[in-house]
Amino acid sequence: MRLHRNLVFATVDALLEIFNEGQYADKVIEKTLKRDKRWGARDRSFIAETTYDIVRWKRLYAEIAEVKEPFSRENAFRLFAVWATLRGIELPDWKQIEDTPTRRIKGRFDALSKIRKFRESVPDWLDELGVAELGEETWEKEIGALNKQAPVIIRANRLKTDVLTLKQKLADEGFETINLKDYPDALQLVERANIFKTESFQNGLFEVQDASSQLVADFLGVQPGDRVVDTCAGAGGKSLHLAALMENKGQVIALDIYGNKLKELKRRAKRAGAHNIETRAIENNKVIKKLYGKADKVLIDAPCSGLGVLSRNPDAKWKLEPEFLDRIRKTQQEIIRQYSKIVKKGGKMVYATCSILPSENQLQVKDFLASEEGKDFKLVEDQKILSSETGYDGFYMALLDKAN
């Protein structure tokens, strides 16, 4: 592979923004890719994937390169040089990366790879937490799986098509996909590509949604005609799935504290032809109280650490802090206790997170069931999805029934 100066420099600029300014990797990459209209698909792919790679392995590469944060521009080039050397890419004769000790890099990589916190590139506290919550063996497998690049999975929109018709249509548009056993609406792209420009996407035939995430709406067991409340809807991936499962019949009320996310949901719903979704911004408690005892089904896709989705958000490893985890667990318990009041007698509720930690999952459900608000509920079943077992995002979901 021949390295191009403008692509490498763009990557280094992106890394400095992500590491030194605390910007979100996906937003920085999106902005960086707009810098030069002449860049083709391969150029853009190089910038995006190289940036994500170096973000993912930041601790390991920084240790090998012997650099510390905040990184100078020279440090960022050293991180890049480590990345290239470990991939067997010949380094060009540029002053920014001259004198790169390639043999020493490989030696340090071999030595550091024997120590998990370096090999899997995680902060000490996170490595200790993973072991404490999941046990040595499970954490070892799980963090290894979460450090792999996530595949691109799409969900066929049943309101407009079915999975076989969509598969053929995408093939006609030049995109090869494979069906996924046990995920009835899912297709996986054989090669990573920008599918947002396809006619199929513009016409609302599919949404990009990880396979594990596609299990959540199904788990709630919605029926056409139900009144369903998606309490932490965000930009609405699961609301759209619920609407499709309900065949546009009944009502999906999508709540969120962020109005801008609900605007995005409205735009997506229009494209998907989902007419039974109503958005309501949570501006105060009255919005929630008005719904007490009114819903057949309630989905709580709770805010969480996001540890189950590190493969698609590797920068979360460096943004997470123990204090945030303490706060988010408290928030989760407040949310499940308050939003559970929306479920009517005889109704159902799903509590879900994209975390793999029992303290955010099983223990939250256990605490809720022991609380005053949880006394009328019982756990029907729960599902713990590990990335190391499925190859998809780590997730948790618990289905609870409310007594009549």
Image (spheres, rainbow, N blue to C red):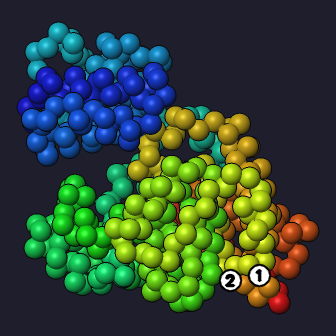
**Would residue 153 appear left or right of 386 to someone viewing this image?**
left
Q: Nearer the viewer, residue 262 or 303?
A: 262
The image quarter containing residue 296 is bottom right
Q: For label 2, count other residues whose C-alpha is less than 10 Å away and answer few (under 14), some (14-19) or many (20+).
A: many
Q: For label 1, count other residues whose C-alpha is less than 10 Å away and answer few (under 14), some (14-19) or many (20+).
A: many
Q: Quadrant of the N terminus?
A: top left
Q: Residue furthest right?
A: 372
| Relative image position of residue 234 (x, y in whole percent) | 53, 57
Residue at image x 29%, y 73%?
205
| Relative image position of residue 196 (x, y in whole percent) | 25, 58
Label 1 secondary element:
strand
| Relative image position of residue 94 (x, y in whole percent) | 14, 14
**Taking the image as drawn, is residue 157 in sight?**
yes
| Relative image position of residue 371 (x, y in whole percent) | 89, 66
Residue at image x 76%, y 88%?
346
Instruction: Give the answer, above or below, for where 269 lies relative to 13.
Output: below
Instruction: Give the answer, above or below, for where 88 lies relative to 204.
Output: above
**Would residue 52 appear left or right of 195 to someone viewing this image?**
right
Lower position in the chain sequence, tag 2 or tag 1: 2
Residue at numbered disc 2:
296
Residue at image x 24%, y 36%?
33
- Gap between marks 2 and 1 measured at Cα: 6 Å
Q: Quadrant of the C terminus?
A: bottom right
The answer to the question of whether label 2 and label 1 lie on touching residues, with beta carbons closer than 8 A, is yes
Q: Amino acid at mark 2?
A: Asp
